[in-house]
Image (cartoon, rainbow, N blue to C red):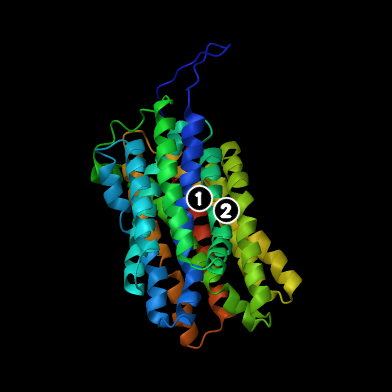
Amino acid sequence: MSGSTAGATGAGRTVPRGRAGVFVSICAFSFLVNFGRIAFAPLVDYFIRSGVSPATAGLAATAVWVGSALPRLPTGYLLTKVARHRVLVGMGLFLAAAAGFTAFSPDIRVTVAGALFVGLASGVFFIAANPLVSELYPDRVGLAVGLRGMSSQIAAVTAPFLVSLAIAMGSWRISFRALAVLALALTVVFVFALRRADLPTAGVEDRDLLGAIRAQWHLVAAGVVFVGFTGFVWQGVFNFYVTYLGAKGIATGPANTLLTVTFAAGVPSFVVAGRLADRFTYLSVLLGILAGFVVTLLAFTLVTGWVAVAAVSIVMSLIVHGLFPVADAYLLDSLPDENRASAYSGYSAVMMLMQAPGSVAVGSLAEFGLTYSGVFRGYAVVVGVVTVAMAALARAGRLPTGE
């Protein structure tokens, strides 16, 4: 990766100035955009209790994730014309507008539209931010993307509490008003950070979206297989987590607490996995994560009792959440400068579409009469087959190594 640098060290090396401020701003953006995505999930039950039909209430939660998937390829194309940091400035302004639109929506239909807009902002963010983060710190890609991912995970853990606090203060809209104000303020801070920084120039030759995807299809396909199938399974597991624990005899209150603990366990995983990605080969870490997820998912279907379920859930969360920063580091560190953002957007778009039906699949299989334990064990077998296949390809030298 290339980039402009300034400021000599004692050893004669040059160190870029001002990148820490840009990176911290991106991490703060990461918290805000993921808060916007997650905030609609705890509102579904509130909307239903307020008289909104379950289908319409669920549409709000669906719209934000659809919105997050839709702009990924278009953003990849936009990045062939506009610098990453400029796209992020526009994203910040759009997020502020989308959150404000949602906060002042007069009815549920407008709220659903607001959810879609918030999701669109998040999709733009991840495609523009992740390549930039990897280019800010090319020697510590794993740690950099891990810290960025940890900021998103903190939002996932805290969003239900913050939304509940807003409701307790009188209105769920308070949370989106705060999001709008914070997004606007952070955009201003980000602009000032950009002016003080020596930014990388790694993406200046990335000008052909489809050409980049074709040129790097083998690496894109490897990332999609690693993350797409596993993400599909994880979506189904965590969205039916509370329901499944009810089938195990654990009441809703303790089950919700366990779900929060499970997500919280994923917070340090992003940094730990990022550091492992910097120290060991990407493929060995990815295969280890998939194997660990298979073992813990099978164990999850076998254990009973609050303590045992909690222990397995924490370990499973630590393992599976490490997949995302390592996969990002694998792709972003391996893709050449002239293809990075474009090829990454192709990977991200396909991966998101693969993950999205995970919950619907669990519900549909349950309606056909399968038990949740049976579904999850079947899911574990699928990931196990993927793991063995990818390990065989890696051993035969058929997978990009990322080195």
Q: Residue at x 36, y 30 (%)?
A: 202
Cβ atoms at labels 2 and 1 below 8 Å apart: yes
The residue type indicated by label 2 comes to Ile
Q: Is residue 304 above or below residue 295?
A: below
Examine the rendering and report whether any part of residue 54 can be seen.
yes
Residue nearest the observer in this picture, 145 or 257 = 257
Q: Total of numbered circles in the picture? A: 2
| Helix, strand or loop at mark 2 | helix
The part of the image, by quadrant, that contains residue 47 is bottom left
Q: Is residue 368 above or below residue 141?
A: below
Horizontal side of 153 relative to 359 (left or right) equals right
> Dot 1 corresponds to which residue?
31
Q: Residue at x 55, y 44 (%)?
A: 146
| Helix, strand or loop at mark 1 | helix
Q: Position of residue 339 (x, y in %)?
A: 32, 38
Disc number placed over residue 154 in the picture, else none:
2
